[in-house]
Image: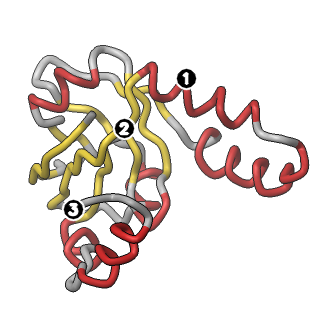
Amino acid sequence: MYKGEYSHTIDAKGRVIIPSKLREALGEGFVIARGLEGCLYVYDADGWKHFEEKLDSMPDITSTELNALRRFMIAGAVDGELDKQGRVMIPNSLRAHADLKKDVIFAGVGKRVEIWDKDRWENALPTDMNEIGSKLEAMGLRL
């Protein structure tokens, strides 16, 4: 399970250092894909394989939505390759999707890592968790 929040900077060529704790957990093979809410998703090799298998096992009743999701996430996904400094190149198309400028946030959110533009991250965080917390507790999650 990935956790933590890390701040880094993207250089002019689109390279960013993967935080060392996340880099160790992601391992050699990882995938960067478009994410929902205007961020990027990063999966380790097993997590990505599980995601693709789950998509393939979904019933055909929702084929239009599944095809849209496949196009959105899988078609634009790239294999992450680290250089000797622990940096990964994020392609222009993915940087544009997440509106990544200079300052980025890596957020470990359980089964994946998310990469956010710092300003977008700050705006995406809820300011009042009371209502959400109440709903989750009603569903059985003790906070």
- C-alpha span from label 1 to label 3: 31 Å
Cβ–Cβ under 8 Å for marks 1 and 3: no
Q: Are marks 2 and 1 in contact (CB under 8 Å)?
A: no
Q: Mark 2 is on which residue type?
A: Lys
The quadrant of the image that shows the N terminus is: top left
Q: Please state which amino acid type lies under the numbered disc 3.
A: Leu
* Left or right relative to 129: residue 40: right
Measured Cα–Cα span from mark 2 to mark 3: 19 Å
Of the two numbered discs 2 and 3 in the rendering, the one whose residue sits closer to the viewer: 3
Q: Which mark is residue 87?
A: none
Dot 3: element: loop
Residue 49 numbered mark, or none = 1
Q: Quadrant of the C terminus?
A: bottom left
Quarter residue 44 falls in: top left
Which of the two discs, 2 and 1, labels the residue nearer the N terminus? 1
Picture coordinates of residue 100 (x, y %)?
30, 61
Q: Position of residue 39 (x, y in %)?
A: 38, 59
Label 1 crowd (10 A; few <14 / some 14-19 / many >=20): few
Q: Amino acid at mark 1?
A: Lys
